[in-house]
Amino acid sequence: MADAGMLRFHVPEPEVRPGGTPDFSDVTIPKAGSVPRPGIDVDPRTIRDLAFSIIRVLNRSGEAVGPWAGLLSDDELLEGLRHMMTLRSFDARMQMAQRQGKTSFYMQHLGEEAVSCAFRKALAPGDMNFPTYRQAGLLIADGYPMVTMMNQIYSNEADPLKGRQLPIMYSSKEHGFFSISGNLATQYIQAVGWAMASAISNDSKIAAAWIGDGSTAESDFHSALVFASTYKAPVVLNVVNNQWAISTFQGIARGGSGTFAARGLGFGIPSLRVDGNDYLAVHAVAKWAAERARNNLGPTLVEYVTYRVGAHSSSDDPSAYRPKAESDAWPLGDPIVRLKNHLIQRGVWSDERHTQAEAEILETVIAAQREAERHGTLHAGGKPSARDMFEGVYAEMPPHLRRQRQQAGV
């Protein structure tokens, strides 16, 4: 055999770096309404192509077309629009608060609002989400109080988590929002285990796991797929592909699989890709996957194709690793603008009403912020008691923690 020469180490590279011209020519966008909607009891082997396409409902004219359309009324869509607008306004105020030193850290959802806001409306009371740090829309769309969210961000005296979580790492059992973990991908196996427990106890509640494209490189992601497929866990396995991890493009974690949805095919899990900036498509796919889980048909893996417009977090500067104008070139547009245009096209909304709604929502968010700040911020006002760090860990506090609490004088 001829000598093949020296081995070369391969490192995937994004199409363009800062200073270059954004290029999404490799993103194939199917025509809205062109992807079929199979029955929920479909044999996964017959829909393998859905792991490589993109399910879309809204076309370029703002019309809802195709077999995935028609699940939501105008009133439900108007409510969804307000949820996304509220999340965006909430983000802007909290990002500003972080810059003012009122909290140490914040993470925005800019450009991704449809994913979590629409998904939440496909679930039933009692279902449990195991989210990452970019699914606050699950809470917004479920009516969780913004003041309570802000109290947690400020870690003030009214913080329901008593300052024991990083800002934006919310927790609410009542709203089906499992405590966020700062350790990436752990929530994936937790969601599958919770779903298995629900099935073992003959309950009716399902789980939803959430992960970003970068974190799919973690071993917990793959372990979750093994258990979900083996035991047909009633769980929806969500992958939010917003193109960028904290500083690396999606190709680093995706490897040679082509798409993240394709990862599910080797486990026999039905796998779909959906336009993550299309509120109607996200809801329709989420409803389909939730119905499969609820009918004992097992897990579904869903990849949401979207784009992180803002920085990864308040500690990140994306201009160091991607072109500044890249978000403007993203071919799937802005989720709020797209739903707004659809509602205008249907004659139930207008530019004037949208502008008025923006002002009303901003006023509501500012009022909530003022109320939260009366309880304190990072460097001013009331704080949780130091005693709280010892509480809520054990059913009965062990002697060594009692001694430590006494030594701390709390």
Image (spheres, rainbow, N blue to C red):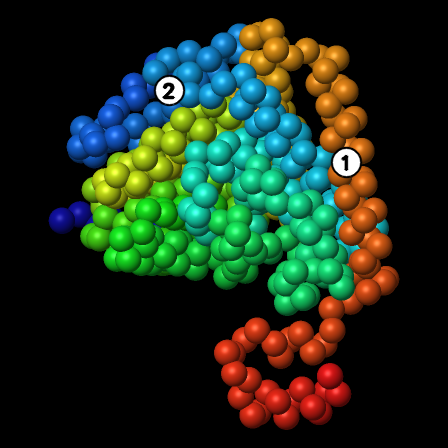
Task: Give the image location of residue 218, x and y in percent.
Answer: 40, 56
**In terms of sequence position, does the residue under pointer 2 or pointer 1 come before the other?**
2
In the displayed structure image, the side of residue 131 where residue 334 appears, left or right: right
The three-letter amino acid code for the residue at tag 2 is Trp
In space, the residues marked 2 and 1 are separated at their CA atoms by 34 Å
Mark number, residue 364? 1
In-front residue for pair 406/97? 406
Element type where label 2 sits in the image: loop
- Which residue is depicted at the point 28% across and 57% down? 201
What is the secondary structure assignment of the residue under circle 1? helix
Residue occupying image coordinates x 49% and y 38%: 120
Quadrant of the image containing the C terminus: bottom right
**Residue found 82% across the figure and 65% down from its top:** 382
Judging depth in this view, the residue of 326 and 404 nearest the camera is 404
Give residue 191's position: percent from left, percent from top.
39, 54
Check disc 2 and report the residue beneath it.
68
